[in-house]
Amino acid sequence: MDYLTVKEAGAKWGITGRMVMYYCESNRIPGAEKKGNLWLIPVGTEKPIDGRRKEGKNA
């Protein structure tokens, strides 16, 4: 299986690497694995929905 690093996933999804790490730490990315201090994210994984905003609601 092919994996992306936190930095690569952040660039692909248009978010920071820190936000990707937060998603990994809170188990919001299925299949993400931690090897030492490195998170590995499966290539075909979709970006998790940002829980800070409600979809379809004007704020």
Image (spheres, rainbow, N blue to C red):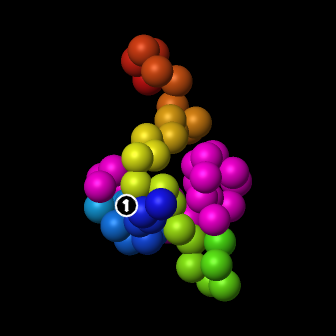
In the picture, measured across the screen, residue 31 lies left or right of residue 1, that is right
User: Can you tell which quarter of the image residue 51 is in?
Assistant: top right
Residue 16 visible in rendering: no
The image shows a total of numbered marks equal to 1
Position of residue 57 relative to residue 26, above or below, is above
Q: Secondary structure at mark 1?
A: helix
Magenta highlight range: 12-33
Q: Amino acid at mark 1?
A: Gly
Which residue is at 50% across, 35% downward?
49
Which residue is more in the foreground, 55 or 44? 44
Which residue is more in the foreground, 7 or 40? 40
In the picture, measured across the screen, residue 58 lies left or right of residue 38, that is left
Q: Residues within 10 Å of mark 1 (few under 14, many from 20)?
A: some
Position of residue 17 relative to residue 28, above or below, is below
Indicate yes or no whether the magenta region holds residue 28.
yes
Q: Residue furthest front?
A: 1
Position of residue 3 relative to residue 28, above or below, is below
Which residue is at 40% across, 47% downward?
44
Percent coordinates x, y for residue 50 in the rendering: 51, 39
Indicate yes or no whether the magenta region holds residue 16.
yes
Percent coordinates x, y for residue 38 in the rendering: 57, 79
Percent coordinates x, y for residue 34 in the rendering: 65, 72
**Residue located beneath label 1 in the image:** 10
Which residue is at 61% across, 52% downward?
31
Which residue is at 43% across, 71% downward?
5
